[in-house]
Amino acid sequence: MVLRLYEAEGADFVRRLNGMFAIAIYDGRPPGPGHPRSPNLLLARDRLGIKPLYYHARGRRFLFGSEIKAILASGLYLPDVNWQAVSDYFTYLYVPSPDTAFEGIRQLPPGHLLEVNLGSVEVTLKRYWQVEGDADHSTDGDVSQKLRDLLADSVRLRLVSDVPLGVFLSGGIDSAILTGLMAEASSGPVKSYTVVFRGDELELYDERDAARRVADRFGTDHHEIEVDVADPGEMFDLVEFFDQPFGNPTFYLTHLISKSTRSETTVALSGAGGDELFAGYPRYRALALARWARWLPRPFLNGVRWLLSLPRDDHRGMGLRRARQFFDGLDPDLARQLLRWTYFLGETEKAALLGPLARSEMAGASGFLHPDRLLRRRLEDSPLSDPGNRVLHLDIETFLVDNILEYTDKMSMAVGLEVRVPFLDHRVVEHSLGIPFGRKLRGGRTKVVLKEAFADLLPEGHAEAPKKGFNLPIARWTQTHLGGYLDSNMSREETERQGIFDWEYIQLLRQQHAGGRRDNSHELFSIVMFDLWYRKYILGTEPIRRWKPASVAGRV
């Protein structure tokens, strides 16, 4: 069907597609009407970047694949580190696209085509989709009804399947809405899957009661899958599915959920994208609060920062870290503020972390570009004028694509599970980004318009239940499993021999964390994941696997 559409419409065929895809079409026809540059190779990636596509172009060589390992397996590319991407990685905990951690390997951006003339190996990148400017809803009728109609149609399209299909059902409203829409469109009971985490460390994230209320409301064939994360050693083996360093530990939960769900079904619907479209993250509330906080006297703000520095963190939650991030990150420059609120190592910290090899490589490349350039460019290029929606659009093009969709695709496909994301139907995205931000976040309430549109589908009290998040106890594991890895594989001698990291600074991060002075868990985890990637893909070695849980001695 896709080839027939291409034959009829040429490269414009991609505008007729709806869904997730990464497509390569070889056109070997001789030059003629409608195809003067044949033979051609055409690559296309879906509008939201749900599916990945990588390529390497150098001289008369062009390689591509849905995974980086396909390019590496060709034997025509010698792995080399992209040090600018490494610098960005330690800020974002992922490598921002279109770069990868490999010099010369790129990602095809979402909503783009890549045409390759195989005669001259000329490469042409074209954008075929972009959200339009703000919609005029003054005469648009019922915005909520249109949202409901579009999302319901998106769900119906994604229920087409020749294999068993279910839904990831958490305690949030996004998955509850999907479950309700699936129930309306299905002739039989919907299969729903909720993960229950074993162990006291994860009791804060237990959403089984909320999920049961939704399952009872729609009479689903409900499955509670118990997962044990007490020994996360398996987590360190998963770098091979990313092919580049990836430092958001949530990927491990997605792996466990996908593996367990795959034993029951082959396709699952997910609520990914709902937070970015409808202002579901705490940082969106922080945006509104920051407008008032900036008027407070500087001595007062400094006093608050000092008070927040006094308590020791027991690493049982994210509250203290988020409060510190909020006040430390206040900045009249929006890009810098979002960078400090959402992401991790700053430039001063990275300069202290990186060793002589990394510094020399970066100096050879004229030094690092500041990571806020990536956010700033997206904000400036957005066609939206509503300030809040510009931030949502930014997160859709960065945090969603390179972080959430990245680990969702990699971890589900690793076990043969196909995950579909109805919220990221491009029609839903276009409509939602046209809805004024004030209809999404109002009086501290998030996702207001979404809750209004689907109020009848949500069990009583479900819409206003606090967001629990989707996290691992990585802060507490830092003194055990991560510490054991660092002790076994990154001794002073080994670290100084490689020259990538400053061993003393890593110990400082560990001591600050162990003493409760600062939550450095994500920073330390990103170091471990980079070391795993560097050993496997650049050095061709494996880490020591028999490490023991460790704790850091010393006082801060």
Image (cartoon, helix red, strand yellow):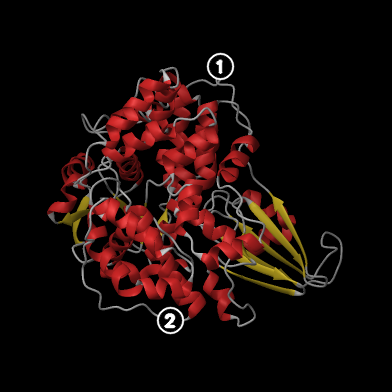
Label disc, if present, on residue 541 of the rendered structure: 2
Q: Residue furthest front?
A: 555
| Residue sitting nearer the eye, 518 or 252 | 518
Residue 358 higher or lower than 437, as above or below: below
Identify the residue at horizontal 58%, vertical 45% (top origin).
Answer: 374
Residue 386 locus on image (x, y percent): 56, 25
Residue 156 locus on image (x, y percent): 42, 46
Residue 70 locus on image (x, y percent): 55, 75
Determine the image quadrant of residue 229: bottom left
Q: CA distance from mark 1 to mark 2?
A: 62 Å
Residue 485 locus on image (x, y percent): 30, 69
Mark 1 or 2, which is nearer the eye? 2
Which residue carries the number 1 mark?
138
Q: Residues within 10 Å of mark 2 (few under 14, many from 20)?
A: few
Give the amino acid at mark 1: Ser
Determine the image quadrant of residue 103: bottom right
Identify the residue at horizontal 57%, vertical 77% (top origin).
Answer: 72
Determine the image quadrant of residue 375: top right
**In the rendered image, is residue 249 in sight?**
no
| Residue sitting nearer the eye, 254 or 545 | 545
Q: Secondary structure at mark 1?
A: loop
Query: Could you tell whether 146 is left or right of 79 in the image?
Result: left
Give the amino acid at mark 2: Thr
